[in-house]
Image (cartoon, rainbow, N blue to C red):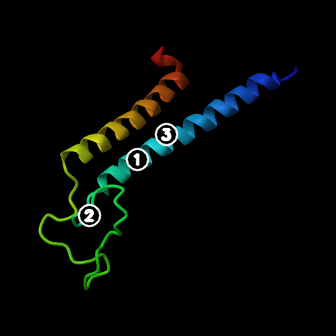
Amino acid sequence: MDPHWSSLGEVAVVSVGATVGIVIVFSLGVRALAAVEEGGEPGDGKRPGGGGSTAYGARGAGAGRPGAPAVAVAGLCFLACAAAVFYGLYLIVPQFH
């Protein structure tokens, strides 16, 4: 029995690529939820916390809560990750076909 090395390589490349893609999309979702800090917008270069007496900076009531667009983007990212996971399970479990 001879292994098909090209098929094995193809499966390895696709699985590594899918794994990296899912991790990146999940990370973008987490980043979208953590994007809003005290007056800072995503990518403005401000460090979170802004200097207060606590370890994470002084926050007022409601400060640091993500807005609706950030929650929507995060939700879409997490939904895409869940869809990829469920599609993988669909491919693996033969009773689903």
> Dividing the picture into quarters, in which one does residue 69 lie?
top left
Q: Is residue 93 above or below residue 76?
A: above
**x then y, percent, for residue 39:** 21, 64
Relative to residue 7, is residue 52 depicted above or below? below
Q: Residue furthest left?
A: 61
**Where is 29 relative to 62, above or below?**
above
Q: Nearer the viewer, residue 12 or 69?
A: 69
Q: What is the CA distance from the residue labelled 3 to the residue labelled 2?
A: 26 Å
Residue at position x 26%, y 62% in the image: 40
| Residue sitting farthest toward the top | 97
- Residue 85 pos. (x, y %): 46, 33
Quarter of the picture holding the N terminus? top right
Mark whose residue sits in front, 3 or 2 = 2
Residue at 36% in and 39% down: 77
User: In the rendered structure, which amino acid carries the disc numbered 3?
Assistant: Ile
Q: Residue furthest front?
A: 44
| Structural distance between the alpha carbons of marks 3 and 1 | 10 Å
Q: Residue at x 26, y 63 (%)?
A: 37
User: Looking at the rendered structure, which numbered label has been put on residue 89?
Assistant: none
For label 2, the residue is 37
Q: Which residue is mark 3?
A: 22
The residue that disc 1 covers is 28
**Mark 1 residue crowding within 10 angstroms, few (<14) / some (14–19) / many (20+):** some
Label 1: element kind? helix
